Image (tube, grey):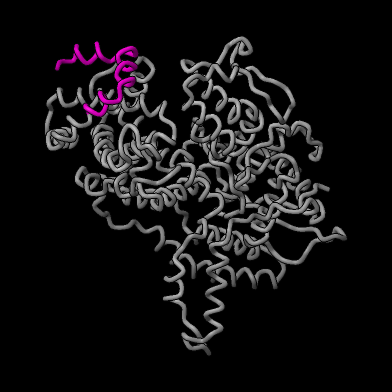
Amino acid sequence: MGNGLVYSWDTRAAINTLTSHPFLLTALWNHISSNIKKYEQYVHGACNDEALGEVLLLFLHCYDNVLQVTDDKEFYDMQRPFALSTVAYMVPLFSKLAFRLMWDGIDEAKVQTAFAKQKGGLQTRLLLLSRSLLHKIHQRNTRKKFCPEAEWLIPEFKLSRGFNFGDVLRYLKENTHNNPFENLFGVLRELSSEMLQSSDPLERHFGDIFGNLRSLFSGLHEMYNRPRPQETTTVSSNEDLLRYQCLIRPMPFVIAYKERLEYLRCLIERDRGANHALDVKFPVTVRRTHVLEDSVRELARLDASGSVHLKAQLHVKFLNQEGLPEDGIDEGGLFKELLEMVIQKAFSPDLGYFIATEDHELYPNPCSKQNTVYHGTHIDFFKFMGRVLAKAVYEGVVVDVVFADFFLNTILCQSNNLGDLASYDKELYKNLLALKDMQNVEDLDLNFTLYDSSTGTHVMLVPNGENMVVTNANLSSYLKAVTNYKLTVQMHEQAMSFVAGFHEILPQSMLALFDRKELQQLISGLDGSFDIMELKQYTRYEGFTDDAPVLSYFWADVTSTMYAPATHWFGTPAESELE
């Protein structure tokens, strides 16, 4: 099987022919699995037989194409074209293939060029298609888990090729942290110098005290700056770091979530330093009676002063009902309180900018333009909300906001498909799936238009859609058009403004480290599903025995609370009004 044969097969018509006959795709996999030792050698780089690579390329292209038109019912319930256990078996095989090709130095620019021109060498196209297929499988796995995390992480294989992500984290920490004595040392030096030159004897006395303190801290200051002994590491320069980053960005799932989270925190600290945000402390004054209104005003003031202030430390001062400053210095608690208050009000469906699904998950209200609560354009308010939520994630503040899966995809700049429609409207998704089982869809007399209940109008899904009848032949296009309108088009303006504000604080390059479930976890923390038995095991009692009845009641209450249906604080209109 030579290169010429592969590239003559590798045409759209040939691929469509292959995917229209699932048994051909199955036959390809049966051939690969029955000769798995040979293919594993090729994946590991121990064999250079291009014939093996060409078969893998053909399979990857076919299966990638099939998954584009496979709905969730077929994939999960009917398990077509492969059993879920078989798909899980494929994951480490193709993860290793993509990892090796990237780690061994295929230029990412060549991969993107191959993608754009639909051409390239065998190795480049193998990388392109293996990554594409893995992303599609991973997206299904986030929707309903069938493949364990360990199958994606391939830890032994990574180590065998000299990949140690711990070296990345160590390098970033050693090259981003600031000397904790630096600011204190500088302040003491300035104070002592100024006071010693004063004509006031009392000030000169304090100048001596500050000078002594400066001498005391100078030793700690120098000790902290002392060079550390060199350790054996795979990351000792920015060039080494770039090699890791080129792999992490397109294939984040080969790194454990906890490591990616730590990596994100390192990137944020680097970002603070690059923007000099560590040295900026921006005062924010907010009336408790006008929390949302004042927060919008203060954030606009921050933005006008320069983007660095959006990432600065905010020192909050609350004014009470009489307009007087409240006692207390903000050491982080008041800032967290302000974020929680703003987010509770701004994201409440009662305010009209977001809508909740039947599962109490939020997405932008397509009709927000009609909302007159906010004194400004509704688009500006969505941008404000994006900034506020991103600021919470940036500062590591967990808030009670849960988004619909399809909107999480939008924040991550990932496309939605028919399966994601279930997170928007389960009934609509069910009805659309039912169309695929009909022998003659034309009997329903559907066309490429859609009634939008939010606006009370009919919209065309494609140009001249009222004259285009939905048939079994074009049903796939109809389903894509409905999905695109519902999840993208109807709320495009609102969603893009929110995402623009969000990305001002957390750029897409950082968000690309996570899938939608992980992004939700960054926003709202763990879902509360932890081990109650483990918690009981490590609990120690004072004044009670383990068999005390009151403890039985206590743990029964804890269990019922933790596993109760999810509730959120978006409640009464009184809590959500903007005064």
Residue 3 is one of the magenta-drawn residues: yes
Is 464 positioned to the left or the right of 522 in the image? right
Q: Which residues are magenta?
A: 1-28
The residue shown at (53%, 90%) is 543
State the residue lying farthest toward the right. 322
Q: How many marks?
A: 0
User: Which quadrant of the figure has residue 98?
Assistant: top left
Is 487 positioned to the left or the right of 323 in the image? left
Residue 290 versus residue 515 in the image, above or below: below
The residue shown at (21%, 27%) is 27
Is 550 positioned to the left or the right of 45 in the image? right
The residue shown at (26%, 54%) is 231
Please provide percent x and percent y for residue 396.
54, 53
Q: Does residue 246 appear anywhere in the picture?
A: no
Please provide percent x and percent y for residue 421.
54, 34
Residue in front for this viewpoint, 387 or 328: 387
Q: Main secondary structure of the magenta part?
A: helix
Residue 459 versus residue 365 in the image, above or below: above
Residue 208 versus residue 568 in the image, above or below: below
Please provide percent x and percent y for residue 200.
72, 69
User: Which quadrant of the figure has residue 113?
Assistant: top left
Please provide percent x and percent y for residue 435.
51, 26
Residue 248 is one of the magenta-drawn residues: no
Is 361 positioned to the left or the right of 125 in the image? right
Question: Which quarter of the rendered picture does the N terminus lie within?
Answer: top left
Q: Does residue 19 appear anywhere in the picture?
A: yes
Residue in front for this viewpoint, 212 or 454: 454
